């Protein structure tokens, strides 16, 4: 029973990948014993599971995911948060205040207002309800400085690199702290705006060229060149 | 529902601005890269496409015949319409023109009309009965800030590109002759928009600067550097000295632009 | 301005624009042209110039229109006032409203609507210049915009029309042929699943002629489908090739 395509071949929706005793993996679907691609991407497989690494996708919430979001509305007893997903997320006041919410006494905007950024975890989500967030854990909460970048969620693993090699390189060369939200939102906090913008450029480059080879070397080269460029300027 | 701008970014924009810099590396009075293409819609009598940074506007000019307005029987008619099509921004909704698209149309119209850019006296077929009607349709295709300047540029470029059919009146009937001639133009107005962010004035605000600005002022200059139209927009305010400063900056930018475009 | 031409097909069997009866007009496709949209595409098909943009899946507005088990697909086909010979008013005409519906119904079968309940997908089509066959060109561009947005699809959708002009069945009618000819049959197809998702007909055809027209249109669809895939590839492969060339150059 055949696999019709080679690994790393580009497919478009509806392309026939395999027929027979195989498993439909990421971004594929099965019909009449045939496996088709459902998104534009690169074919990957190990033995029986056919996957397509999508070149563009969007984030669908999963419980336990750490995400970065923007407050878009202050509601009566909580906030609506944009987590770069088709679904808006909810953050309850009681979660942030770490105690029951008292409508008469508690004013929400001073705590979190429209435009504030938060790192949060998804605590519940299903097909009938919008996702709910919590910030009541260490490492979560309001963000007060840094650059926000949006990246297609499927590229986040590439930004991390094998065993974290790519992200470590970027952190090292730019001196920035980087938080990668699973929802494709990246927070970069550096000492200077130039450092942050350099890290942003590196990540955007990874997103654009994620399907090519030799990327780690090119990124390292780019970062080192920018750094020497800066040092030369300082010496002038 | 346009995206909410984060407080962190707002702070960055205003902090940078205090140091006289912008987030995209431009000087306070720099325009983004401008690309103009003319004649892209062959079926229209004139057309142009402008890319101002990532803001994209297409203008088509159609010419028809019709009755003049009763108070100007010896003039052709100019009418400007603008569409903020829904694909141009997550915040644009389909439907009849809202106040933003109507304001945009009227600002572009004012610049052209008040500068007397089009020689409307030359657009008369039969005085009081039949004149040429110039339809300028502004189509915003991607909104990344400063729709006003992009639209005004595209409208003027489209008018420069416009060809009219030749005609003659014989035995009381209007007959079209073969051939075309350019639309009779006397002036080439250029509009420059400045945004007020904090106490700074910036030229050509992009989308995120527009989300942060207090107010904007758009000023149109004709070829003799006279001001022919002004519109203040936004719910903030300008001090008089800022208005005059904006006019000074806009005049200089319009001169630069005019030289670059050879208008 | 448009006088009715004497003949639509000349002695040599060529049409007004020099094409053979089974020849397509030139088609140019570009993906990812509107930065604000989630997905977008631009098509030039003959003199047609059409932009398609997709937003979604996103929250449904107004909320009460949300469906609990699937996404709502909305489509708006709209022509610019300068897109046709006589200026068209920007307000939606009855034709535009009908086309919005049939185009939506041609694309919806390709979308996995059950994947994202309580959301909405907006498809916006803007015709910048029209010259016959705009609904087909719109569908071809809109399908690319959907693929570009990352919305999971069963298949691409591609469309082409065939018709009858002076007793001959011809492929891909341009504006004059559409207005003066005796029949027009637009067809949209999901090419891998071989499923027809749009079919209309106006004019007069015998059942045999109808079958020939549909088959000819399907042939045209397959040719355009190859160009759709190419457009999607071009967006990604050009970067891949450039980088690998540089790598080889560096190794020399």
Image (cartoon, rainbow, N blue to C red):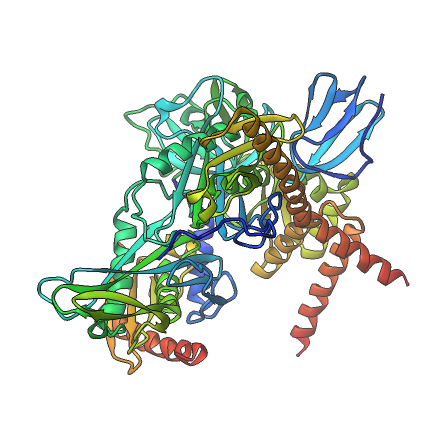
Q: Does residue A227 appear in this view?
A: yes
Q: Which of the two residues, B78 or A65, is positioned nearer the viewer here?
A: B78
State the count of labels: 0
Give percent across and percent down for residue C124: 44, 40
The outermost residue toward the left is B71
Give percent across and percent down for residue B212: 37, 54
The outermost residue toward the bottom is B224
Q: Does residue B2 appear in this view?
A: no
Above or below, A223 relative to C56: below
Give percent across and percent down for residue B126: 16, 68
Above or below, A7 relative to C194: below
Above or below, B243 relative to C184: below
Q: Is residue C140 left or right of residue B38?
A: right
Q: Residue at x 65, y 73 (%)?
A: A234
Q: Which of the two residues, C195 or B104, is positioned nearer the viewer here?
A: C195
Q: Is residue C228 left or right of residue C51?
A: right
On-image quarter of the C terminus of chain B: bottom left
Q: Which of the two residues, B113 or B39, is positioned nearer the viewer here?
A: B39
On-image quarter of the N terminus of chain B: top left
The outermost residue toward the front is C11
Give percent across and percent down for residue A9: 77, 39
Q: Is residue B100 left or right of residue C129?
A: left
């Amino acid at each position: 029973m055949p696999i019709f395509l080679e690994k790393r071949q580009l497919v478009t929706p509806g392309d026939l990948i395999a027929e027979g005793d195989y498993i439909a993996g990421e971004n594929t679907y099965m019909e009449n014993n045939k496996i088709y691609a459902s998104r534009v991407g690169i074919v990957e497989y190990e033995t029986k599971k056919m996957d397509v690494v999508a070149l563009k996708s969007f984030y669908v919430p999963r419980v336990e995911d750490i995400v970065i979001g923007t407050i878009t509305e202050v509601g009566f007893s909580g906030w609506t948060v944009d987590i770069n997903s088709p679904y808006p997320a909810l953050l309850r006041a009681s979660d942030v205040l770490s105690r029951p919410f008292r409508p008469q006494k508690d004013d929400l905007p001073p705590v979190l207002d429209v435009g504030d950024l938060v790192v949060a975890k998804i605590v519940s989500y299903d097909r009938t309800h919008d996702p709910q967030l919590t910030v009541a854990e260490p490492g979560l909460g309001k963000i007060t400085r840094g650059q926000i970048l949006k990246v297609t969620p499927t590229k986040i693993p590439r930004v991390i690199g094998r065993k974290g090699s790519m992200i470590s390189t970027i952190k090292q060369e730019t001196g920035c702290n980087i938080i990668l939200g699973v929802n494709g939102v990246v927070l970069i906090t550096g000492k200077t705006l130039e450092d942050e913008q350099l890290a942003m450029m590196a990540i955007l480059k990874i997103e654009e060229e994620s399907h090519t080879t030799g990327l780690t070397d090119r990124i390292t080269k780019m970062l080192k060149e920018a750094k020497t460029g800066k040092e030369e300027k300082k010496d002038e | 529902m346009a995206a909410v701008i984060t407080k962190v970014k707002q702070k960055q924009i205003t902090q940078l601005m205090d140091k006289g810099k912008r987030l995209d590396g431009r000087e306070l009075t720099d325009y983004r890269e401008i690309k103009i293409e003319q004649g892209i819609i062959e079926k229209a009598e004139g057309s142009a496409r402008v890319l101002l940074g990532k803001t994209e506007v297409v203008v088509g000019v159609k010419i028809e015949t019709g009755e003049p307005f009763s108070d100007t029987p010896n003039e052709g008619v100019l009418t400007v319409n603008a569409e903020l099509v829904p694909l141009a921004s997550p915040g644009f909704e389909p439907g009849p023109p809202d106040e933003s698209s109507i304001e945009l149309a009227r600002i572009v119209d004012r610049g052209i009309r008040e500068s007397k850019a089009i020689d409307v006296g030359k657009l008369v077929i039969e005085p009081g009965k039949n004149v040429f009607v110039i339809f300028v349709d502004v189509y915003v295709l991607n909104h990344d800030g400063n729709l006003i300047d992009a639209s005004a540029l595209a409208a003027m470029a489209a008018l420069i590109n416009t060809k009219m059919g030749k005609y003659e009146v014989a035995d009381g009937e209007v007959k079209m002759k073969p051939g075309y001639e350019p639309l009779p133009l006397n002036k080439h107005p250029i509009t420059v928009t400045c945004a007020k962010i904090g106490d700074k004035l910036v030229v050509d605000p992009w989308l995120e600067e527009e989300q942060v600005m207090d107010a904007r002022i758009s000023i149109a200059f004709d070829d003799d550097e006279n001001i022919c139209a002004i519109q203040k927009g936004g719910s903030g305010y300008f001090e008089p000295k800022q208005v005059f400063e904006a006019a000074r900056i806009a005049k200089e930018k319009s001169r630069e632009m005019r030289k670059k475009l050879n208008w | 301005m448009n006088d009715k031409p004497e003949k639509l097909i000349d002695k040599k069997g060529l049409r007004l624009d020099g094409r053979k009866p089974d020849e397509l007009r030139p088609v140019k496709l570009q993906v990812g042209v509107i930065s604000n949209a989630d997905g977008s595409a631009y098509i030039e098909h003959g003199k047609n110039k059409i932009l398609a943009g997709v937003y979604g899946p996103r929250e449904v507005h107004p909320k009460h229109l949300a469906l609990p088990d699937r996404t709502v697909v909305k489509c708006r086909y709209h022509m610019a006032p300068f897109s046709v010979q006589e200026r068209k008013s920007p307000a939606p005409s009855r034709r535009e409203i009908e086309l919005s519906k049939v185009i939506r119904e041609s694309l919806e079968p390709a979308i996995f609507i059950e994947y994202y309940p309580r959301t909405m997908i907006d498809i916006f089509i803007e015709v910048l210049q029209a010259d016959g066959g705009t609904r087909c060109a719109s569908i071809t561009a809109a399908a690319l915009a959907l693929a570009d947005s990352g919305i999971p699809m069963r298949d691409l959708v591609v469309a082409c029309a065939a018709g009858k002009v002076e007793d001959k069945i011809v492929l891909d009618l341009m504006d004059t042929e559409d207005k003066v000819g005796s029949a027009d049959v637009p067809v949209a197809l999901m090419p891998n699943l071989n499923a027809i998702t749009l079919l209309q007909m106006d004019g007069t055809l015998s059942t045999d002629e109808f079958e020939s027209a549909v088959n000819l249109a399907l042939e045209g669809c397959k040719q355009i489908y190859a160009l759709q895939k190419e457009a999607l590839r071009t967006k990604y492969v050009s970067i891949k090739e450039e980088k690998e060339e540089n790598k080889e150059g560096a190794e020399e």
